[in-house]
Image (tube, rainbow, N blue to C red):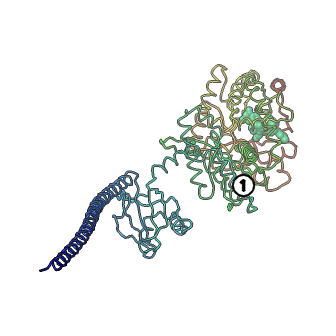
Amino acid sequence: MNVEQDEAHSNYLRKRLEREKRAREQAESLLESKSRELFEINQILERSNEYLDEQVQQRTSDLQAQTRLAQDNATRLNSALERLEIILTAARAVSWTYDINQRTFRVNGGNTELLHFALDEPVKLDELKQILHPDDQAQLLESFSELSYLNHKTDTRLRLKDQSNQYRWFALTSVMSRTDTQDPMLLGALVDVQDHVRREEEAWALSNIDTLTQVANRHYFEQLFARAKQEAQDTRTGFTIGLVDINEFRLINESFGQRTADRTLQALADLLLDQFEGNAAVARLAADEFVILFDQEVKATQAFDRLEQLVTSIDHFELNNGDRVAITLSAGAACFPHDGQKFDHLLQAIQTANQHSKQSRFSSPKCVMYHPGMDVSRQRDRNIRQNLHRAVTKSEFAFALQPLVSKEGEWLAAEALLRWPKGPQDCSTQDFINVAESCGLILPIGEWVIKQAMTQLSDLHAIDPDFWLSINVSPAQFQHQDLASTIEEAAQGAKVDLSRLTIEVTESLFLDDLTRVKSSLDRIKALGCSIAIDDFGSGYSSLGYVQQLPIDYIKIDKRFVDQITERPESHNIAKAIIDMSHSMNSKVVAEGVETALQVQALAALNCDALQGYYFSRPVAPELLLAELKQRSEAL
Ligand code: C2E
Ligand code: CA
Ligand code: CA
């Protein structure tokens, strides 16, 4: 090989080497870059793996946390439900749902001992109604039907039968809601509020009901009155109110004690409820003062008749301890709006009417309807009453004596008629006796009369030992005093002959318990006194009494005597009374004889004695004693 060839070959080799070197270098750098890429990819992969791992871990722990939470929630929910049950049970409540389509009611939880229904038992509405108090049926339906999506909650109270079939009060809360399928449904709670209601009722009763008699008290009555008044004004009608009280109630208190007096009030309250409760409200205003507020539907005349019937039919109470107390009642009535628009005015009106009832009770017990003229006499009576108290303590009384004369003109006896010289002007004996009877003052006055009669009797006997004295006693004295003992005690110091004393009683006395009256009269007779029936023919006029009771004299009322010469009926009645009395061995006195014609007529009828202005007016005792003296000296 030549040099050139060598050179060329070496060039070639060199170049090839260089090419190879370059290629290698390129390959190397490629490799390097690829491997760098790979490395990076690897790194990325690694990182993303790490990230995924993290994610997985995170997710796992999240899931674990959520599971724990769910478990916690479930436990919490369970314990919340348990707690709810505990609370419902403790609060004596049940939760319920009502399916509107099915019309079924279900108790879902709570105190299942309260009601008849088992937990989750479907109860048809009709079955539910069977344990619902009849008065509360409407309440339930109303409270369901008032629910809407606008008004989604209602509350009411109703009575349901509990497991022992007793009605109990429940508070019903109803809420409008939806089922899972979005249908409307009702749900709510029933809470036993029986104790609560009872306490409410007790509190209400405490301020509205009279504890002794269990009728409305004054406070509640005023509310009832206001309601009745409003109603009457709205409907342009009226109503009647009445007042009933016990005559001389104070004396029951004094003579039998407070317990008996309380029982008497209870008996009266029971009687009034029994008689009027259906269409009237009964209340106790004070001591023995009861008011009756009649419903609008009851006409005034009906109310009046019923009160009258009560007053005339009751003469005693059987108390709840077996005791028996004799009582009489008075009643007054007035009408809204006619006799007053305000409570106080009407109250005054019935009190005034009642006062009149009291005054007339011995002649004819009745209910009295108020009229405005009564106010004047009420004022007058109040004045008399105030003065009478003083008169009693100072014994400001005196007798006037009026002779009783035989048909031959002989003076046989005198009637002692009470006088009150210092009494108010125009106040007659009858006026103040009436007031005294209505307020109980008749008792001390009556005692004075009996005592004074003894003095009178001994004065009379000093002149004529055969002369009689008649005194008047009021029925109240029989009711509240032991009259025989009072007479006996009065006679003791006076040394008088009681067989010359006549006790005049009025017929109304026999409205009382007859056996009681008879035993009183028997005891008075046993002292030697005689008994006369005063004003015979003015009231109940039954000769039947005369037969049953120890009556010595019958005094024919002035009314018959007045007309004896003019009206044949009066003449006939007088004749019948005289004949029948004689057949029963009683004597007859004619009262109020004013004319010679009357004397003639009565003498012809064989009347035993006559009394009246024709012979003498009632005169001061000294005058009568003087006249008597003259007459006995003339004999
Ligand atoms: P009374 O017991 O019927 O008495 C008769 C009344 O008629 C007396 O009225 C007497 O004055 C009157 N009088 C007598 N004769 C005539 C007459 O010819 N014409 C007229 N127009 N009247 C005559 P007085 O004294 O006003 O007594 C009225 C009533 O008061 C008595 O009626 C009696 O019920 C009662 N009273 C009188 N004193 C007492 C008493 O001491 N106790 C009681 N509880 N009541 C008495
Ligand atoms: Ca008399
Ligand atoms: Ca009389």
SS class, disc 1: helix
Residue denoted by label 1? 229
Q: Can residue 29 be seen in the rendering of this structure?
A: yes
Q: Is 263 placed above or below 76 here?
A: above
Label 1 near ligand 1 (CB < 8 Å):
no
Q: Quadrant of ligand 1?
A: top right
Instruction: Name the quadrant containing residue 589.
Output: top right
Residue positioned 76% across, 33% down in the render: 385
Q: Is residue 394 above or below residue 368?
A: above
Q: Is residue 555 left or right of residue 50?
A: right
Percent x, y of residue 411:
79, 32
Query: For this rendering, which residue is in front, 291 or 26?
Result: 26
Of all residues, the one furthest to the left in this rendering is 1
Count of marks, rendered view: 1
In the image, what residue occupies the spot 66% across and 58% down? 295
State the quadrant of the C terminus. Answer: top right
Q: Which quarter of the figure has residue 11?
A: bottom left
| Residue 488 location (% of width, % of height) | 61, 26
The answer to whether residue 405 of the structure is visible from this angle is no
Q: Residues within 10 Å of mark 1 (few under 14, many from 20)?
A: many
In the displayed structure image, the side of residue 625 where residue 12 appears, left or right: left
Above or below residue 98? Residue 528 is above
Q: Is residue 207 left or right of residue 227?
A: left
Residue type at numbered disc 1: Lys
In the image, residue 566 lies at what x, y percent?
A: 86, 53
368 and 578: which is toward the camera = 368
The quarter of the rendered structure image containing the N terminus is bottom left
In depth, the one of 575 and 277 nearer the eye is: 277
Nearer the observer, 73 or 578: 73
